[in-house]
Amino acid sequence: MANRHRGEIEATLGGEQRVLVLTLGALAELEDAFGGEDMLALATRFETGRIGARDAIRVIGAGLRGAGANVSDGEVAEMSTDGGAAGYIAIVADLLTATFSGGGDA
């Protein structure tokens, strides 16, 4: 079960219930993936609501790896979720909210 006070969320991906968390290492991975943007710049970037499919893959992949899953971005790209594209965006939004809101419910 996910602990939102630790920034964890649960999501169904590829038919499995999974835990995602953006640890400090996962955030560093995202900084590298997005051209060296710092954490504040990443949060601001996603606050605008503009997110591409590659962005969603990177964030979801980093969240899965942060929770201990051994999964590549290529494998994440092949995972399905309820709601299609909107479902992926909801996962990303929930994960970012859990990470940057300081814990508690979204």
Image: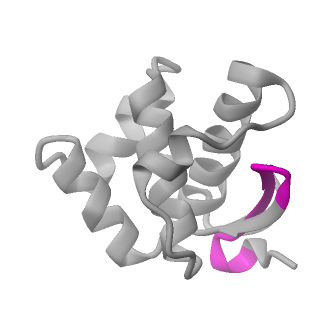
Which residues make up the magenta segment? 5-16
x, y percentage for residue 56? Answer: 50, 36
x, y percentage for residue 26? Answer: 38, 68
Q: Quadrant of the N terminus?
A: bottom right
Q: Is residue 3 above or below residue 75?
A: below
Q: Is residue 9 above or below residue 14?
A: below
> Residue at coordinates 38% horizontally, 35% vertically from top-left?
44
x, y percentage for residue 23? Answer: 46, 75
x, y percentage for residue 48? Answer: 46, 21
Q: Is residue 13 left or right of residue 36?
A: right
Q: Determine the image quadrant of residue 103.
A: bottom right
The front one of 42 and 81 is 81
Q: Is residue 14 left or right of residue 59?
A: right
| Residue 11 painted magenta | yes
> Residue at coordinates 73% horizontally, 37% vertically from top-left?
80
| Residue 6 painted magenta | yes
The front one of 22 and 38 is 22
The front one of 11 and 99 is 11
Q: Is residue 72 above or below residue 81?
A: below
